[in-house]
Image: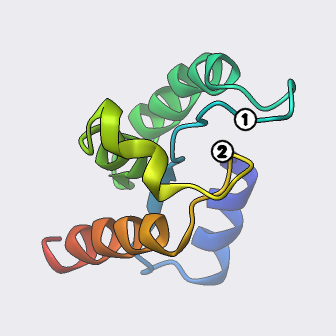
Amino acid sequence: YQAIIDSIRKAAPTAKIYMGLPAPVMQCIWRRHQEKYLQMLMPYYKQLAEQNPDIQIIDVHQAFMDLGDENRLDYYLEDMLHPNPKGLEVIARTVCEAIVNN
């Protein structure tokens, strides 16, 4: 991830960089794709943001968590990994708000 950030800075030194925290993994049908593994990565994303204080975090994960446990499943495809069109609207709205408010 740091290499990507460095490449962006090199190619476009004045670019504003946003880092999205991924949507939660629901009851995914694939064992390798589970929320517990995503949670293991979250500290690294946050550490990366601390090391790069000019980066704006877009917390897509929290946007989905805010939907509430009973409603969240309605925002995923049948595989419970990928957001469906309603979920994509949540992502788009979250990204748009972050960009407009920054």
**Amino acid type at mark 2:** Met
> Considering only order in the chain, which callout, 2 or 1, is on the residue closer to the N terminus?
1
On screen, residue 95 above or below 31? below
Residue hosting label 1: 28
Which quadrant holds the C terminus? Answer: bottom left
Q: Is residue 15 left or right of residue 64?
A: right
Q: Position of residue 95 (x, y in %)?
A: 35, 70
Residue hosting label 2: 80
Q: Is residue 82 left or right of residue 67?
A: right
Asked whether 17 or 87 is in front, the reply is 87
Question: Secondary structure beneath disc 1?
Answer: loop
**Amino acid type at mark 1:** Cys
Disc 1 to disc 2: CB gap under 8 Å: yes
Residue that appears at 71% across and 59% down: 4
Residue that appears at 81% across and 35% down: 29
Question: Secondary structure beneath disc 2?
Answer: loop
Q: Position of residue 80 (x, y in %)?
A: 66, 45
Disc 1 and disc 2: Cα gap in Å? Answer: 5 Å
Q: How is the image coloured?
A: rainbow
Q: Residues within 10 Å of mark 1 (few under 14, many from 20)?
A: some
Q: Position of residue 59 (x, y in %)?
A: 36, 48
The numbered mark at residue 93 is: none
